[in-house]
Image (cartoon, grey):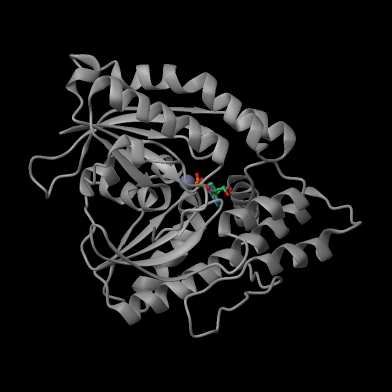
């Protein structure tokens, strides 16, 4: 079965075609993967202006879909279904993808499958050779969301915790701005922190608070970090080395909380696989620290982390999620839903 995925929830316009495996133990085959990003524009403004992102989506959507379908021998006729992100995300951006998908579903006479963007992120883990096993726990850490979910099977998700304020990615983005680092803040902070690591070995990084780390639940809070960084940086001139030090401190504070709560959840739910997902899953320090703790504490779980290019927004994971959750819905009933949660 060949599925065209369409993703336009934020500043990426993406389309991809995947082929589902004939044997369920195999991973899906990627036939095309096209991503156009308006990130360059948002770097200039230090963050996303939704109106601008939507305008860029309009320009890119048709060429991106054409390019994704081009490698198919009979073009779109070879497709068995179309999958589209219907939320959460920016309303203007989502509308472009959803309305385009509905139109081509009608014109091409292909079933349409709506995909929750956050659930889609988890399916980046089904693109690697080693497939996750159920029960699994998933930590979705993106620009707008931080959710821990128990996956008993495909389509059987249970929310066990999440952020009470800012998302982990948002914490990276906002604090990076305070340090004068470019958007998106996650990769910029990771890079600055990496420089420090090369200069100073075994640095003890404990300047910033780790909110809720000791609480016996699976919730997170990252808004206090922003205030703490503001206090540390306000009206101060800092040199490159101070910036690297602060970046490492910020990264460590975010990673510590994520890792700590994840390990506790893995032990409690005794899952076979732990899945990292979302843009922040591309963070090397997060992967490294989680892997180290799982091994040091002898936790019997297999850690799955998608390659970095599959962690950030793309349409392959949208098509893959549709492949494992083939819920086709009458196109007339599908609507862009910016406020969707991972459980909707
Ligand atoms: O999942 P994603 O591509 O888009 C959303 O659905 O939000 O995630 C984007 C977020 C941004 O906040 C960005 O700063 C963060 O992921 N991010 C990272 C890294 N790469 C992207 N955060 C930390 N370290 C990274 N290497
Ligand atoms: Zn995303």
Q: Quadrant of the C terminus?
A: bottom left
Identify whether 14 is placed above or below 122: above
Q: Position of residue 148 (x, y in %)?
A: 42, 67
- Tell me: 318 left or right of 1: right
Identify whether 184 is placed above or below 275: above
Identify whether 241 is placed above or below 134: above
Residue 200 seen? no
Camera-nearest residue between 58 and 73: 58
Q: Residue furthest left?
A: 23
Q: Residue at x 54, y 65 (%)?
A: 255
- Tell me: 252 left or right of 238: left
Q: Residue at x 54, y 84 (%)?
A: 215
Q: Residue at x 42, y 42 (%)?
A: 86
Q: Position of residue 212 (x, y in %)?
A: 59, 78
Q: Position of residue 16 (x, y in %)?
A: 33, 30
Q: Position of residue 117 (x, y in %)?
A: 42, 47
């Amino acid at each position: 079965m060949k599925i065209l995925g369409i993703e336009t929830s934020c500043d990426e316009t993406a389309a991809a075609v995947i082929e589902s495996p004939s044997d369920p133990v195999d991973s899906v085959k990627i036939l095309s993967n096209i991503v156009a990003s308006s990130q360059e524009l948002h770097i200039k403004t230090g963050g996303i202006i939704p109106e601008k992102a939507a305008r860029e989506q309009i320009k890119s959507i048709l060429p991106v879909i054409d390019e994704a379908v081009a490698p198919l021998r009979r073009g779109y006729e070879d497709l068995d279904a179309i999958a589209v992100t219907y939320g959460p995300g920016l309303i203007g951006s989502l509308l472009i993808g959803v309305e385009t998908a509905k139109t081509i579903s009608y014109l091409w006479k292909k079933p349409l499958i709506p995909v929750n963007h956050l659930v889609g992120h988890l399916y980046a883990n089904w693109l690697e050779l080693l497939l996750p096993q159920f029960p699994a726990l998933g930590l979705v850490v993106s620009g707008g969301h931080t959710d821990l979910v128990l996956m008993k099977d495909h389509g059987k998700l249970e929310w066990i915790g999440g952020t009470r304020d800012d998302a982990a990615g948002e914490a990276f983005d906002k604090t990076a701005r305070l340090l004068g680092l470019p958007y998106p803040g996650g990769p910029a902070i990771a890079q600055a922190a990496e420089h420090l690591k090369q200069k100073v070995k075994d640095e003890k990084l404990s300047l910033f608070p780790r909110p809720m780390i000791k609480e016996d639940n699976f919730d997170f809070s990252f808004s206090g970090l922003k205030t703490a960084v503001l206090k540390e940086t306000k009206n101060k001139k800092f040199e490159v080395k101070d910036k690297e030090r602060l970046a490492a401190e910020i990264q460590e504070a975010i990673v510590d909380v994520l890792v700590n709560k994840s390990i506790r959840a893995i032990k409690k739910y005794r899952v076979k696989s732990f899945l990292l997902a979302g843009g922040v899953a591309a963070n090397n320090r997060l992967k490294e620290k989680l892997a180290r703790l799982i091994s040091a504490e002898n936790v019997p779980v297999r850690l799955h982390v998608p390659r970095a290019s599959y962690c950030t927004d793309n349409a392959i994971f949208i098509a893959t999620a549709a492949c494992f959750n083939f819920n086709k819905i009458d196109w007339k009933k599908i609507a862009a839903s910016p406020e969707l949660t991972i459980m909707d």
